[in-house]
Image (spheres, grey):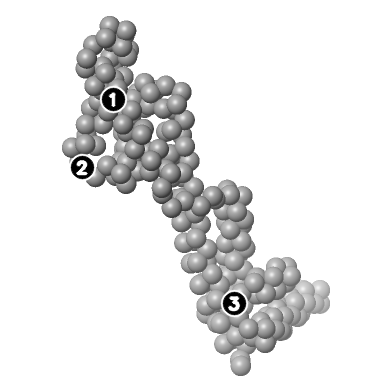
């Protein structure tokens, strides 16, 4: 197989790996962020239900969109969702003016709506399909993605376009690919051979300059 064909195979593998890693990182980050958001909301509610009402009452896009996307998993009705927004604002204002101490019936009604929201959120949190995600694992994937992208910069359409300084890094990325061992070996030798030409050409240029 020609060297150019071998490099094209490597480029294709790395392009696929780049897409795979990008998708995986996005998936894990989304899941991690959702669980973190749920935990934060539940923590606020445990501290003080009025703090949660205040938070909800002040939501604006894009935070409001994120909140609605979460709540829509267990509250489907648009009217019910809007009612949560209204009663959150009511509860926040009534607490501010001590309506809880005064025993105003509307206060209890608004509080019940927010308490039911917390209850539904707790239930959803217990039944949702969630697997623990280590943030360090996400960072490791990001680092590996960067290494793949950096290696890809050396190649263009089957050609080595710049001299490789750290050949061990290329070998590492190739070794982690899904290619069979014979193809991996052939690609490494092809790259080494082509890369040596850069050194030879550089040496010739330096020699010319000294004449």
Judge left or right: residue 115 versus residue 139. left
Residue 82: image quadrant is top left
Label 3, on which residue? 178
Find the residue positioned furthest to the top.
102
Please tell me which residue lies in front, 161 or 27. 27
The relative height of residue 168 versus residue 117 in the rendered view (above or below) is below
Q: Mark 2 or mark 1, which has the lower sequence index? A: 2
Please give the name of the residue rendered at 36% of the width and 32% of the height, measured from the top-left corner: 118
Please give the name of the residue rendered at 59% of the width and 77% of the height, measured from the top-left corner: 178
Label 2, on which residue? 77
Please give the name of the residue rendered at 69% of the width and 70% of the height, measured from the top-left corner: 172
How many neighbours does mark 2 have within 10 angstroms: few (below 14), some (14-19), or many (20 or more)? few
Q: Nearer the viewer, mark 2 or mark 3?
A: 2
Q: CA distance from mark 2 to mark 3?
A: 47 Å
What SS does tag 1 mark? helix
Residue 211: which numbered mark, if any?
A: none
Q: CA distance from mark 1 to mark 3?
A: 56 Å
Label 1, on which residue? 112
Where residue 65 appears, as percent x and y from the top left, is 31, 41
């Amino acid at each position: 197989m020609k060297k150019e064909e071998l490099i094209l195979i490597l480029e294709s593998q790395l392009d696929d790996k780049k897409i795979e890693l990008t998708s995986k990182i996005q998936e894990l980050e989304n899941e991690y962020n959702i669980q973190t958001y749920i935990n934060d909301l539940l923590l606020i509610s445990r501290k003080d239900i009025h703090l949660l009402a205040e938070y909800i009452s002040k939501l604006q896009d894009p935070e409001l969109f994120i909140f609605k996307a979460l709540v829509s998993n267990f509250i489907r009705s648009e009217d019910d969702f809007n009612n949560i927004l209204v009663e959150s604002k009511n509860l926040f204002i009534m607490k501010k003016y001590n309506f809880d101490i005064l025993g105003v019936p509307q206060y209890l009604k608004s509080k019940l709506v927010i308490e039911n929201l917390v209850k539904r959120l707790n239930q959803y949190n217990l039944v949702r399909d969630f697997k623990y995600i280590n943030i360090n694992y996400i960072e490791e994937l990001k680092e590996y993605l960067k290494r793949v992208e950096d290696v890809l910069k050396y190649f263009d359409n089957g050609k080595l376009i710049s001299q490789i300084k750290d050949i061990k890094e290329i070998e590492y990325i190739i070794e982690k690919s899904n290619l069979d061992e014979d193809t991996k070996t052939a690609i490494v030798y092809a790259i080494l051979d082509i890369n040596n030409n850069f050194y030879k050409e550089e040496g010739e240029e330096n020699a010319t300059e000294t004449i």
